[in-house]
Image (spheres, grey):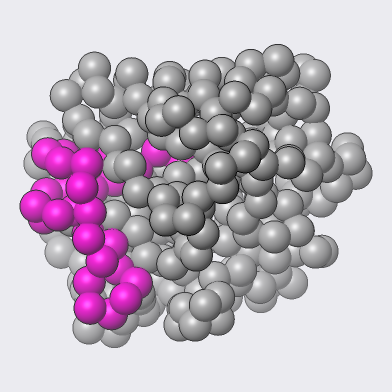
Amino acid sequence: MFKRSGRKLLRRTRANRAQQQSVPILKSPQEIQIMREAGRIVARVHQALKEAVQPGVSTWDLDQIALGVMQKYNAVSSFLGYKGYPANICASINEELVHGIPSKKRRLCEGDIISIDIGVFHRGFVGDSAWSYAVGQISDDAQKLMKVTEDSLYAGIKLATVGNEVKEISRAIQHHVEDSGLHIVREYTGHGVGRDMHEPPQVLNYVGGDADGNLLLQPGLVIAIEPMVQLSTWETETLRDNWTVVSKDRSLACHFEHTVAITNSGPKILTLP
């Protein structure tokens, strides 16, 4: 996830956004196949973490499990060391939207929800996916938030077809979320993916009048689609660690993401098992 245009904490920010349409970096079928390998590794990390998410487990434990799976498949974290980020994954609990830093002191509790964002480098390309998980039994509000956010991701992916504009993805996500009475975060966006974690175009989760929204989707474009949704506000703020982003009113936050290739046969999700 970018904060809108510019320095990502790990994501792009709206500050200093480009005024002109970005030039996408198209990938060859062979490059997309390598990205599929990277995406499959990310999916395997998620599978291991899904099994590990339970009350009492620390987010540092999750980080170390992720590291072990990455090493097994000769991949490295694309997050570790980026702008000084100190961990292999992002693990964000409850009101934390993104960029939560794993810690031995942060232990999961019954009723929590946790968003885990994973990026790897493999054979020179990036795989990037985030998923949110329930810790034991969760509230009705948390269940609704997770379902709406995940469903909005697939609503966006469905529109990731050749000839559509980027904003069609944005519109589908926004409508699904807002029609459900929830709130799309404005400051953070999806993005292109390739040899770098963040390439053009920006992929907003709402229709915002940005230049990238008019970009036509072409075969070979690979993008991270990642709705970020909060229960009762779209506003966020960053904590004093300069990384962890939380909902401004401390209501629950949720994040789902897949890396998707645009192909002539339709959208291809690269971050599946």
Of residue 143 and residue 245, the one placed in the foreground of this image is 245
State yes or no: residue 189 in magenta: no
Question: Which image quadrant is residue 33 in?
Answer: top right
Give me the residue at 48% from left, 63% from top. Answer: 8
Q: Nearer the viewer, residue 233 or 123?
A: 233
Q: Which residue is found at the position 40% from the left and 71% from the top?
A: 62
Q: Position of residue 258 (x, y in %)?
A: 54, 41
Q: Is residue 120 left or right of residue 57?
A: right
Q: Residue at x 22, y 41 (%)?
A: 234
Question: Residue 219's spot in the image, x, y percent?
Answer: 79, 27
> Quadrant of the rendered structure where residue 32 is?
top right
Residue 261 is left or right of residue 206, and the answer is right
Extreme residue in the front direction: 19
Our reading of the magenta stretch's main secondary structure is loop
Q: Is residue 136 in sight in this rendering?
A: no
Image coords of residue 72 (percent x, y): 68, 72
Residue 59 quadrant: bottom left
* Quadrant of the snapshot with the C terminus: top right
Q: Which residues are magenta?
A: 225-254
What residue is drawn where x is 49% and y is 34%? 210
Q: Is residue 247 magenta?
A: yes
